[in-house]
Image: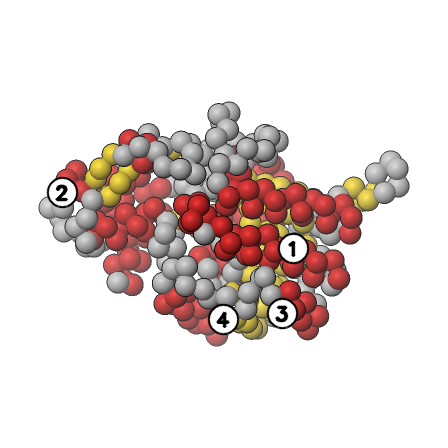
Amino acid sequence: MKKNIVTGAAGFIGSNLVTKLFSILDGACIIGLDNMNDYYDVSLKEYRLSQIEQTQAKSKCSFKFIRGDLADKELIDKLFNEYKPDIVVNLAAQAGVRYSIENPDAYINSNIIGFYNILEACRHYPVEHLIYASSSSVYGGNKKVPFSTDDMVDHPVSLYAATKKSNELLAHAYSKLYNIPTTGLRFFTVYGSAGRPDMAYFGFTNKLVNGETIKIYNYGNCKRDFTYVDDIVEGIMRVMQCPPEKKNGDDGLPIPPYALYNIGGGRPENLLDFVQILSEELVRAGVLPADYDFEAHKELVPMQPGDVPVTYADSSALERDFGFKPTIDLRTGLRKIAEWYKEYY
């Protein structure tokens, strides 16, 4: 019967989380918040909301959707005052590394001011647990792999990464000062059906369908720890149930109830292999013709600003504390995407 707020509820990860919660919770109240901005095709967000409504109709949970912005402090305060949530999952953010280079204001408003508003609301309307999305981008150009949450992350290579590191620092401060249980989750290259069109696999698919050439950066030598969205959602749900313990140190003062985890598959994939499998699955699903010449539609180009050559998650802490690690392999995930793309478009 708990009350849960999920921000970014019409977003890629948020909508998948809400839908999954309906299937496992009994009688819970879920409040979804999203500003429905036009960073990408709004009809995709509306599609996700329709999927949420269909699933909710078959569940015993209630759902309330609120269209609003994290940066609207008055709205956030009103939301917490009205619903007094037990658990808050903050997934709303301005995403995208490249977009942050040209549009920094959007990142400061959503990822800094918006997250501050959430923390302030959790302070004034105490919650059992705040879970928030961080990103593998915080590791920047770290050479040591796999990336561990014990690694130093003081050299971001994009504004997006800097805002996510800032979220972790702010959460730690609020956990220390106000004894708010917070858990940050560093997501690694999330992919899946009905994802964001600015994601590489989505953009690649659109270009291949239109007969355009796709650019593969760093001459195909980039590696990404792709994590299918169902695995991300499973990780979030496990973490939701177990807030960091509130306890005092030897000095009698609270030890910050703060935790931080990676969620990644732990299997970095070469980008060239990724697009090869994607093209094969698009052919299999009937999105591309059987005789499609993939080689003629790819171009190897240099690295672009803000990108990193490799991401690789050490998710051993998540497995240790929650008995979970991502399991969905790349071909299975890309097959689901190709089938969804065929049905949706």
The percent coordinates of residue 266 (x first, y second) are 46, 35
| Residue farthest along the left direction in this orientation | 291
Q: Nearer the viewer, mark 4 or mark 1?
A: 1
Q: Nearer the viewer, mark 2 or mark 4?
A: 2
The percent coordinates of residue 313 (x first, y second) are 50, 35
Q: CA distance from mark 3 to mark 4?
A: 25 Å
At x 59%, y 61%, the residue is: 71
Q: Look at the picture and state if 251 lies above or below 145.
A: below
Q: Amino acid at mark 3?
A: Leu
- Circle 4 Cα neighbour tier, 10 Å, few/some/many (<14 / 14–19 / ≥20): many
Name the residue tied to disc 2: 293
Q: CA distance from mark 4 to mark 1?
A: 30 Å
Q: Amino acid at mark 4?
A: Gln
At x 16%, y 50%, the residue is: 211
Name the residue tied to disc 3: 75
Q: Are marks 1 and 2 in contact (CB under 8 Å)?
A: no
| Left-right relation of 198 to 258 | left
Name the residue tied to disc 4: 56
- Circle 2 Cα neighbour tier, 10 Å, few/some/many (<14 / 14–19 / ≥20): few
State whether residue 23 appears in this view.
no
- Return the disc, 2 or 3, that comes first in the chain's sequence: 3
**Viewer-nearest residue: 328 or 340:** 340
Q: CA distance from mark 1 to mark 2?
A: 49 Å
Q: Amino acid at mark 1?
A: Tyr
- Return the disc, 2 or 4, that comes first in the chain's sequence: 4
Name the residue tied to disc 1: 116
Asked which secondary structure carries label 4, the reply is helix
Label ID, residue 327: none
Asked which secondary structure carries label 3, the reply is helix
Q: Amino acid at mark 2?
A: Asp
